[in-house]
Image (cartoon, rainbow, N blue to C red):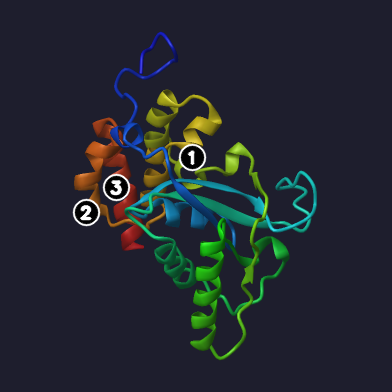
Amino acid sequence: MSSSTSPVDASMDVPPMDRRAPADCAHAAFALGCFWGPDALFGAQEGVVRTTVGYAGGGTPNPTYEDIGDHIETVRVEYDPAHISYTDLLDLFWAAHAPTRAPLKRQYQSALFPATPEQAEQARASKTDVAAEHDGPLSTELIADASFTRAEPYHQKHKLRRHSAVADPLRAVYPEDQAFADAPAAALANGYIGGHRAPARLDDDASRLGLPTEATEALRTIAEDRHRA
């Protein structure tokens, strides 16, 4: 990326993994409580290209965090089916929360938002299988063809935003909020900061992320602290 087109920190170019990100991705959305954690969880998975948090599942027009209405906090996941399947994502979804627990309010409802008829069929089958393993009924809703409203910029990659030593080099490459939030490297770094990817994997991921050395070591320290916690 040239400094003549945008104010890029000379110590970092567009991350290699972003340059190689597939253009033709599948997508689906998931809700399992506050969306900050799932944003990091899904972003840490191999084959996930980008993640976006937002609001879905309700009829209230133009939802916002301050006026969410009957919508649910949701993470939209774009993924490469050649490296991770929808059923893999479903397995991750069920393992990451308690689907029998009723939420305190609809905002944190457990829900699946399949994007295709095939996904809907797989979601129904997985829900049936998981329900058979639990004594009580599942609270998880299955909502197909739901509209998705992107959440405010300060919610996107929330965990990464709290660590400027890692976030700032990426913000220099992607000064616009949406470009930063949609960067595959931001999703992966957010996954490390959330504690969802083993710190040892950074030995291989560092070249893909393309962060300056100081930022890489800061990310390693954060990830190691999260795994010790």
- Residue 161 disc label: 1
Location of the C terminus by quadrant is bottom left
- Whichever of callouts 1 and 2 sits on the residue coming sooner in the sequence is 1
Quadrant location, the N terminus: top left
Image quadrant of residue 110? bottom right
Instruction: Tell me if residue 175 comes above or below residue 18 in the rendering.
Output: above
Specify the amino acid type for callout 3. Answer: Thr
Q: Position of residue 63 (x, y in %)?
A: 74, 47
List x then y, in percent, for residue 167: 42, 35
Label 2: element kind: helix
Residue 200 disc label: 2
Residue at 21 percent of width and 54 percent of height = 200
Which is closer to the viewer, label 3 or label 2? 2
Mark 3–mark 2 Cα distance, whole angstroms, equals 11 Å
Q: Is residue 108 above or below residue 135?
A: above
State the residue position of label 3.
221
Q: Quadrant of residue 218?
A: top left
